[in-house]
Image (cartoon, rainbow, N blue to C red):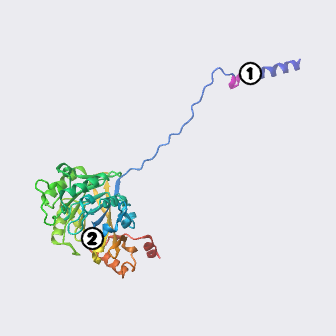
Amino acid sequence: MKQIIRILLISISMLFIVACSPENKAEEVEKEPVVKEEVEKVEEVTEKEITVSAIGDMLIHSTVYEDAKIDEGYDFYPMLENVAPYLSESTLTFANQETMIGGVEHGLSSYPSFNSPKEVGDALKEVGVDVVSIANNHTLDRGEAVIQSSIDHWNDIGMTYVGAYKDHEDKEDIRVIDTEEGISVAFLAYTYGTNGIPVPEGKDYLVNLIDKENIKNEIERAKEVADVILLSLHFGLEYEDYPSDEQKDLAQFAADQGVHALIGHHPHVLQPIEWVEGKDGHETLVIYSLGNFLSGQDELPRQIGGMVNFTIKQKVADNSIEITSPKFLPTFVSYEKGADYHVWPMHEVTDEYLPDAKDHYKKTVDHISEWLPELEIIKGEDDLKNEEN
């Protein structure tokens, strides 16, 4: 009897277990998975930053463009490839294209009335230049046709040009570049004159001449559409190592108008860099002359030029702008019997190209930083390693 009862109890227990198993439940309640919410911490941006570089005169003499001749036309890139890495590092790079690039269809020509191959523009584009000034004393050398042909090519390659324009409407368009970092930069450019060639009547758009009232008005317009104002002036006396009284006066004027940096050209030699204090304590970085970057001029001071670089910072809270960390790369143009032109970072130049190269390099550094002791000189990796050792 006990055996029967034991069997019955076991049977009932088995039935109970089977009935309670998940497979036999009438309804199975699915549980929602537990998801942990991950909150990304976004670091608050308090300051935006970009860098700007500028180079000196691209003055294309016949010896230079003849050296660039190839079967398909002209190739100036090999002349610039040694400095290309420095030009392409900045957010924006500016150049003074002193000769119009009207092209072979208008007949190439050299000093005193220049017209250069269009391929000069292609090379500048390739090495990282973003903006060119074409307001200088040679703008009108070959007349309106060459200016228009030059501008057409700048437009074709997508290069921003400033200082000379196609028409009145083009002139009214303030050149502003909106960087990916969120800082907008306006470029303005003017020249002291055009070598005595009169501007055609009713066509003042063909070249911007230095006129304080006009510059002041355009600076005010630029402030309405851009965060930063960079002013290029073609001024000063040729081959003078120091700025003239007129340059000093215009630098003070620019600082008083709130210009952030003044980039100067025309003397074909380097002049010292300095800060100029304007109204309300505003400081303007003034580069009076960057010398020749690439030219056929054959006297030593005119073979030396450079690239200036500086940082632009903008505070998000009040949009205020500060120019910091000015740097300079001295450059040197080598050639052999009026050919084989190359632009070098000057710290790479040996006595083979320039006798007493190190001495000339030191003199160049001392001169450019004479009024700006904190100016940092850009050097190559080998130079930095030697200093560390």
Q: Residue at x 46, y 45 (%)?
A: 40
Q: CA distance from mark 2 to mark 1?
A: 99 Å
Q: Position of residue 67 (x, y in %)?
A: 34, 68
Q: Residue at x 30, y 65 (%)?
A: 55
Position of 165 relative to 272 (above/below): above
Of residue 121 and residue 45, the one placed in the foreground of this image is 121
Q: Position of residue 370 (x, y in %)?
A: 28, 75
Q: Decide: marks 2, 1 in contact (CB < 8 A)?
A: no
Q: Position of residue 372 (x, y in %)?
A: 28, 71
Residue 338 within the segment the image draws in magenta: no
Of residue 372 and residue 31, the one placed in the foreground of this image is 372
Q: Quadrant of residue 297?
A: bottom left
Residue indicated by mark 1: 16
Residue indicated by mark 2: 291
| Label 2: how many Cα within 10 Å (few below 14, some 14–19, many 20+) | many
Residue 22 within the segment the image draws in magenta: yes
Is any atom of residue 133 visible in this view?
A: yes
Q: Quadrant of residue 165?
A: bottom left
| Label 1: how many Cα within 10 Å (few below 14, some 14–19, many 20+) | few
- Region of the chain picked out in magenta, as a range: 19-23
- Depth check, mark 2 against mark 1: the one in front is 2
Residue at the farthest bottom position: 356
